């Protein structure tokens, strides 16, 4: 089996900070001098150019849920959206060595009969990922809300890795946390398990689980292109790296601090919170990403 890089997505890292008692008040946070954040480049290959994103849907997803995810991936390489846009967020990855990665949605595989059961291990995720393409591709496994995955909700909301062998293929997994751990993997659309119990934000597409999946999918996609084979950009140990987005936990807008996502945009009609426009009139809430030009975590608003 290939490498699986375990990392804590921003939501799960946020919980760690809260458990450690680092829920800073804004006045205190302003007094803390921010140190430059450095993700070291380890001289490995990155994903650049045209990259096909193949989707493997495991379990029951509605057509509306699938369209939210598909529109998000298409939004990352679309120039048609208003600013701030998902595409402008994704362009930060072009600042990493080697230039831009343009994502296109490839084939979609529906595995609605739970052929591997409803409790999956890493080997099952790798097997499902193999149903995608093999050339210039990232294969994404998406598990439904009633599917339990090893480590899900305990130490991770998603992962990425690569297949073994000479021609390694990057893949990733993200689960729907709606009924299992929305306070961990769908924050800030649900109150956190620990820490300040501030009112949750309204999900921009009306689906706490899938809007949370978008945040975690953004995290693993950014990690997959900037650290696809565990020798790209990251900080810390290779077995548990902090990557382009996972190094910036809990940040969605200006003024964010642990427990507070920051100032984001609000839809005047629905009251939903977002910071990025997408295709087909979509709105998304996307996490901060590390900018190699400024050595800092950057938000869209």
Image (cartoon, rainbow, N blue to C red):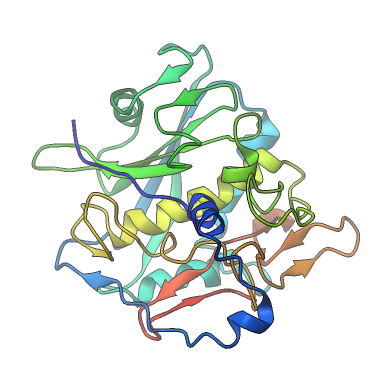
- The residue under the point 57% across, 49% down is 214
- The residue under the point 67% across, 67% down is 275
35 vs 102, nearest the viewer:
35
Image-quadrant location for residue 63: top right
- The residue under the point 44% across, 18% down is 119
244 vs 183, nearest the viewer:
183
Q: Look at the image and tell me whether residue 94 can be seen.
A: yes
Name the quarter where the N terminus is drawn: top left
Q: Look at the image and tell me whether residue 170 can be seen.
A: no
Question: x, y (%) of residue 9?
Answer: 46, 51
Up-down relation of residue 226 to residue 55 (above or below): below
Left or right: 54 in relation to 264: left
Question: x, y (%) of residue 171?
Answer: 32, 41
Up-down relation of residue 56 to residue 259 (above or below): above
Up-down relation of residue 296 to residue 109 (above or below): below
Tell which residue pokes out farthest to the left in this image: 166
Name the quarter where the C terminus is drawn: bottom right
Tell which residue pokes out farthest to the right in this image: 269
Left or right: 134 in relation to 114: left
Question: x, y (%) of residue 75?
Answer: 57, 58
- The residue under the point 59% across, 61% down is 286
Up-down relation of residue 153 to residue 27 (above or below): above
Question: x, y (%) of residue 226?
Answer: 31, 62
Left or right: 270 in relation to 290: right
Give the number of callouts: 0
């Amino acid at each position: 089996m290939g490498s699986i890089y375990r990392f804590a997505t921003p939501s799960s890292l946020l919980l760690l900070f809260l458990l450690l008692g680092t829920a800073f008040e804004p006045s205190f946070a302003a007094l803390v001098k921010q140190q430059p954040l450095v993700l070291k480049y380890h001289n490995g290959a990155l994903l650049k150019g045209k990259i096909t994103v193949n989707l493997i849907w495991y379990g029951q997803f509605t057509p509306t849920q699938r369209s939210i995810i598909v529109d998000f991936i298409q939004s990352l390489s679309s120039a048609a959206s208003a600013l701030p846009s998902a595409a402008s967020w994704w362009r930060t990855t072009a600042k990493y060595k080697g230039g831009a990665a343009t994502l296109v949605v490839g084939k979609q595989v529906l595995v609605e009969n739970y052929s591997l059961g409803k409790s999956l291990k890493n080997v099952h995720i790798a097997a499902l990922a193999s149903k995608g393409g093999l050339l210039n591709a990232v294969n994404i496994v998406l598990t439904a809300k009633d599917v339990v995955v090893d480590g899900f909700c305990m130490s991770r909301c998603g992962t990425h890795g690569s297949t073994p062998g000479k021609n390694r293929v990057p893949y990733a997994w993200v689960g729907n946390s709606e009924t299992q751990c929305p306070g961990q993997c769908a924050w800030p659309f649900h109150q956190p398990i620990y820490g300040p119990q501030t009112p949750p934000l309204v999900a921009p597409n009306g689906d706490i689980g899938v809007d949370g999946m978008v945040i975690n999918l953004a995290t693993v996609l950014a990690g997959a292109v900037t650290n696809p084979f565990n020798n790209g950009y990251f900080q810390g140990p290779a077995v548990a790296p902090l990557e382009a987005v996972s190094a910036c936990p809990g940040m969605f807008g200006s003024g964010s601090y642990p427990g507070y996502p920051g100032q984001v945009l609000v839809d005047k009609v629905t009251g939903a919170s977002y910071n990025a426009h997408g295709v087909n009139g979509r709105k998304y809430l996307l996490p901060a990403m590390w900018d190699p030009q400024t050595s800092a975590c950057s938000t869209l608003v």
